[in-house]
Amino acid sequence: MTWFKDAVISGLQMLMALRLRNSPSAETMQALTKVWLAALSSRPIQWDEGQDLPRLRKAFTELSAKSTHWPAPADLMNAMPPRNNQFKLDYKAKSTMSPKSREMLNKLLGKLKA
C-alpha cells in the first residue's frame, strides 16, 4: 500500500509546515509517520486507493484548515468524509406470483382482516 503511506506522509508534512501548537519536532518525523501508519492501519477498514485516497487527502486538508494544535490519528479519521456507496447493490425482489394467485391472496388477506 505505497499509496497509503505516501498519502499519510504528505498529509503529515502539510501539518508540520503549519507549525501548529504541540507540533512534534522535525527529527521525530520518521517515528511519527510509523505511529500514524500503525494507528490508521489498525482500523477495521479495507483501505482502497480508489475510494480512500481522495478521502485521506480531504481529511488532511480539513485538519490543516481547522486545527490550532497538533491532531491525533483519531482526528484524521473523524475528518474523513464517508465512503461513496457506489459499490452497494440495490436489490429489489421480484414477485413470481401470477396475477390470479395475487388476487386470491389479496382476497384471503381481506377475509383475515375482517
Image (cartoon, grey):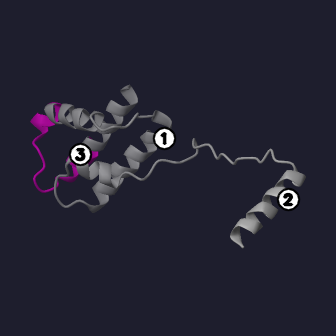
The residue labelled by disc 3 is 73
- In terms of sequence position, does the residue under pointer 1 or pointer 2 come before the other? 1
Q: Is residue 53 magenta?
A: no
Q: Is residue 16 magenta?
A: yes
The residue labelled by disc 1 is 51
Name the residue rendered at 24%, 49% in the picture. 74
Local packing at callout 2 (Cα closer than 10 Å; few below 14, some 14-19, many 20+) is: few
User: Is there a contact, CB below 8 Å, between mark 3 and mark 2?
Assistant: no
Q: Say if 24 sits above or below 31 in the image.
A: below
Name the residue rendered at 84%, 57% in the picture. 104
> Quarter-wise, where is residue 24 in the image?
top left
> Quarter-wise, where is residue 78 in the image?
bottom left
Number of marks in the image?
Answer: 3
Q: Where is residue 65 drawn, in percent x and y?
A: 31, 60
Quick one: SS at disc 2?
helix
Image depth: mark 1 or mark 2 in front? 2
